[in-house]
Image (tube, rainbow, N blue to C red):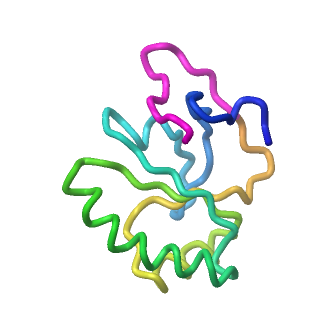
């Protein structure tokens, strides 16, 4: 495990491409709201597909509470979009396909408020 991703710490503010291929920072997606971040192996994994199907139901509840849901997946752009459509997901999927993803500096004013459990 990475030294900066441990229980009780602030999640790093990564910048990755989303499902329409736009670069997005986690703090930008979160805004002033709580956020649930799901790490996915991708649509090929039956367990992850099942989890995403269940997250569709949870997402409705999260939206009522102004809570964001974001999935980081290892899939390519076409696989990500096929996966989202297949399970009926309407939240943001970020892609780890860019092996060169970069961590952005976090200032105290824009620091991620998400806590790793």
- In this rendering, the answer to whether 5 lies above or below 42 is above
Specify the farthest residue to the top: 108
Q: Is residue 72 left or right of residue 66?
A: right
**Toward the viewer: 106 or 22?**
106
- In this rendering, the answer to whether 79 lies above or below 111 is below
Specify the quadrant of the image occupied by residue 8.
top right
Q: Where is the C terminus found, in terms of image quarters?
A: top right
Which residue corresponds to the image point at 49% horizontal and 86% vertical from the top-left? Answer: 86
Q: Where is the N terminus found, in terms of image quarters?
A: top right
Q: Is residue 2 left or right of residue 106?
A: right
Q: Position of residue 38 (x, y in %)?
A: 54, 57
Q: Position of residue 65 (x, y in %)?
A: 22, 50
Which residue corresponds to the image point at 40% horizontal and 62% vertical from the top-left? Answer: 91
Magenta stretch: dominant secondary structure: loop
Specify the quadrant of the image occupied by residue 82.
bottom right
Which residue corresponds to the image point at 71% horizontal and 30% vertical from the top-left? Answer: 4
Does the magenta segment cover residue 23?
Answer: no
Q: Is residue 68 left or right of residue 51?
A: left
**Toward the viewer: 96 or 39?**
39
Q: Position of residue 32 (x, y in %)?
A: 31, 32
Does the magenta segment cover residue 114?
Answer: yes
Q: Position of residue 93 (x, y in %)?
A: 52, 61
Q: How many marks?
A: 0
- In this rendering, the answer to whether 86 lies above or below 40 is below
Which residue corresponds to the image point at 36% horizontal and 50% vertical from the top-left? Answer: 68
Extent of the magenta region:
103-117
């Amino acid at each position: 495990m990475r030294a900066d991703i441990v229980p009780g710490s602030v999640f790093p503010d990564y910048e990755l491409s989303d499902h329409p291929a736009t670069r997005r920072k986690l703090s930008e997606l979160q805004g002033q709201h709580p956020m649930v971040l799901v790490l996915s192996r991708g649509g090929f994994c039956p367990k992850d597909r099942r989890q995403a199907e269940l997250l569709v139901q949870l997402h409705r509840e999260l939206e009522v509470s102004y809570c964001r849901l974001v999935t980081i997946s290892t899939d390519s752009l076409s696989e990500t979009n096929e996966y989202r459509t297949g399970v009926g997901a309407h939240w943001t999927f970020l892609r780890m396909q860019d092996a060169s993803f970069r961590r952005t500096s976090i200032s105290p004013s824009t620091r991620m408020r998400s806590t790793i459990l």
